[in-house]
Image (spheres, grey):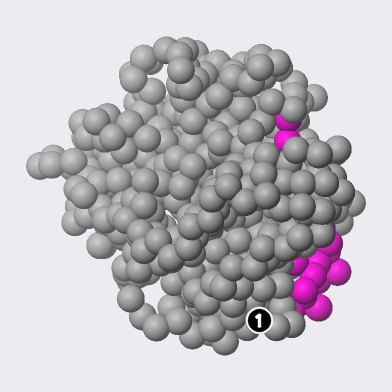
Amino acid sequence: MEAINKSSYRPLWHFAPQQNWINDPNGLVFFKGEYHLFYQYHPQGTTWGPMHWGHAVSTDLVQWEELEIALYPDENGTIFSGSAVVDWHNTTGFFPDEPGLVAIFTSHSEGKGEPVIQTQSLAYSRDNGRTWTKYEGNPVLRFADKEDFRDPKVFWHKDSGKWIMVLATGQTITLYSSPDLKSWKLESEFGDDIGFHGGVWECPDLFPLTIEGTDESKWVLLVSVGDSPDYNEGSRTQYFVGSFDGSVFTPDDAELRWLDYGRDNYAGVSFSDIPDEDGRRIYIAWMSNWRYANHVPSNGFRGSMTAARTLGLKRRENGDVVIVQHPVQELENYFSNERIAVKDVVLADGRKEVIECSLEAFELRLEAEPLEAKEFGLIIHHNEEQYTTIQYSTDERVITLLREHAGPHDFSDMFAKPQQMKLEPSDSLNLRILVDAASIELLLADGTAAMTSLIFPDQTCQKITLFASGGTVQLASLTVLAAK
């Protein structure tokens, strides 16, 4: 593992390119023992520009090898977001000898004074994603009346025996089907009069998940919502739970559900072709926000990905079905050097517990019972002047993350504002916190709540302070696991 260069905020174990700009993850697919991560990439600068597909591979979802650029702009435009699949049965005709990878992506074309044109195109690889050939019949899907017509997420729907494309189309999601990835038929459109419409809809994903403790499965539709100055949070991701019959997605209800209550989890999608014997739905997102993504501190690169997470469903006591997120189990091998363990400590009003914790990357696990305390929490001291505070209000059942003292934030008026989420009365109070050089990811209440946040301190951590006010807190356990 390379030595950390803290001045560049380079993460130890989240994926970031060696140099230049990245945003949305694209083409997440597993094939022949490798997890492929493609991503929006601008190879000539550290701000958003003409989009390419960058490429990295991993065998464990933690350590990534950056490869050559996979897809370059062409006569149809720059290479916007999309997905990748394994064509196991040669439905395309691209793979007469053995299965291979197909990328389905948006070609984005705009000229000075010309209207934006977004169409869907194909490329294929016969050498495990190392080289790519554009399909000579590109584009394979166009729609003249919509400027926003992009981000195809494609999967094979076994029950109906066809490929399904889920496409972002302005303020809706449109579904298409195909026998061969080349010819597409309109199936349905979703999104009118439901969900959050405070920004353009982007980067959809549609997949089934089983509800914990049951044999019942539901379909989940992820929809990222772009930034709008009319709203405080910038870009973020909503999701819907319902059913899918091979043509139409039908939500169970109109409840607004957010995937993550932090400001730095966007455009996330799941991996295709995870083997049946594995069975996980694995998800990665871009760790930034369009409100300030072009302006965060940079030293040769700008942008990184979240930790890989598994997604599941849980039915709450009130009947609501919600997504559950957990770090992938491969991280257990990465954060395995136990440094600190605290058990059965009572934090009285005003008492503080200080833990020396000079680490560059770590995982913190905490279980507590607030008893009568009005508030308790922890402070991650990055150094003597810089710190991040995570606090819990018992009366309001609200978790707040404060990063105004965690390093530079003058690049954005919104960056330093508090980030908050409310827990349900039935939620247990446990936290898993993943900390890297420039990020904090909180997973709470057995994974039913998440908050992802960038920070830019000069050091990751010197010590951690636990505190309580307005009563006592029973700290059942606190464990800090250092990165190897």
Q: Amino acid at mark 1?
A: Asn
Tell me the quarter of the image containing the N terminus.
bottom left
Nearest the eye: 377 or 161: 377
In the image, residue 413 lies in the stretch drawn in magenta = yes
In the structure shown, which secondary structural element does the residue marked by tag 1 occupy?
Answer: loop
Q: Is residue 65 left or right of residue 469?
A: left
Vertical arrangement, residue 324 with respect to residue 337, above or below: above
Q: Residue at x 54, y 83 (%)?
A: 6
Q: Residues within 10 Å of mark 1 (few under 14, many from 20)?
A: some
Q: Give the residues in magenta.
A: 403-424
The chief SS type of the magenta part is: loop
Measured as percent of width and height from the top left, residue 473 is found at 72, 46
Q: Residue at x 37, y 39 (%)?
A: 272
Q: Residue at x 82, y 46 (%)?
A: 471
Q: Is residue 391 left or right of residue 317?
A: right
Vertical arrangement, residue 99 with respect to residue 323, above or below: below
Q: Is residue 417 in sight in this rendering?
A: yes
Measured as percent of width and height from the top left, residue 221 is found at 58, 30
In the image, residue 151 lies in the stretch drawn in magenta = no
Vertical arrangement, residue 218 with respect to residue 201, above or below: above
Q: Is residue 329 left or right of residue 201?
A: left
